[in-house]
Image (cartoon, rainbow, N blue to C red):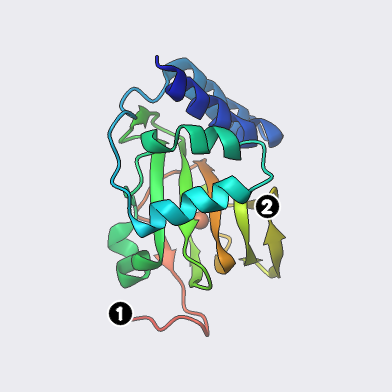
Amino acid sequence: MTEAVQTLIDALCLPLLAETRVEAARTALVLQEMGPQQLCIPQPQTADHLAMRSLLAQSCHPAASGLLAAFDLIPWGINPVAAQVGDRGSMYVVATLMGPEGPVPCADLRMGLYYQRPNTYYGLHNHDADETYTILAGSAIWTAGEDTQLRETGAQIHHPSLMPHAFRAGPEGLLTFWRWSGDVNLHSYTMLGDPEVVLTA
Ligand SMILES: [Fe+2]
């Protein structure tokens, strides 16, 4: 395992170990034991990549420096719910790091990173899986069920199964770590109607 891959694994474990839930600790264990074997694919440098690097460079989160050092290993662009979100997917970029389809294979856990462009609104949605987000850089006006408030770097937000959630990224954008546990199926991922979203179907 290269030093950069170990740096990436160590950085990804920080938000997992900061969460007290058993499933978060198990996610870290799977990552540490198996390692992202296929995370050595050169990534193109897009405007989003440059924005993410800039956000990480300014972040005070302890995982930020490791993610920045290993940034070229992160497989940005794999959106597991692209079919469900349609055009809304153009406002964000996802890196899937663990799940039934890999790159770190695990049948009942998913994990990855999420970047949302500045001042964009990703509307209410839900899914069967339990989910925890950790904000690694930037901020958002965050809706989790009935609660809407400003969430900043370091915040951890837990969405129990089927809780509606939505994010309005701040002026600097939003970079998060996310993980799923419980029923991690993709077919239940649903965009919900709310005043900010015009549903096309
Ligand atoms: Fe979610």
Among the 4 quarters of the image, the one containing residue 26 = top right
Quadrant of the rendering where the N terminus is positioned: top left
Residue plotted at (50% across, 73% down): 121
Q: Would you name the residue on which mark 2 appears?
A: 153
Q: Could you tell me if the residues under marks 2 and 1 are in contact, i.e. CB atoms within 8 Å? A: no
Name the side, left or right, on which 135 lies relative to 79: right
> Is disc 1 surrounded by few (<14), some (14 to 19) or many (20+) residues within 10 Å?
few
Name the side, left or right, on which 175 lies relative to 110: right
Residue plotted at (56% across, 25% down): 10
Name the side, left or right, on which 199 lies relative to 177: left
Residue plotted at (67% across, 42% down): 61
- Identify residue type, mark 1: Ala
- Identify residue type, mark 2: Thr
Among the 4 quarters of the image, the one containing residue 166 = bottom right
Among the 4 quarters of the image, the one containing residue 28 = top right
User: Residue 162's x, y, as percent?
Assistant: 54, 58
- Compared with residue 155, is residue 5 higher up or lower down, i.e. above or below? above
Q: Secondary structure at mark 1?
A: loop
Of the residues under marks 2 and 1, which one precedes in the sequence? 2
Name the side, left or right, on which 104 lies relative to 57: left
Q: Would you name the residue on which mark 1 appears?
A: 201
- Compared with residue 3, is residue 148 higher up or lower down, i.e. above or below? below
Residue plotted at (40% across, 57% down): 48
Q: Secondary structure at mark 2?
A: loop
Quadrant of the rendering where the C terminus is positioned: bottom left
Q: CA distance from mark 2 to mark 1?
A: 35 Å
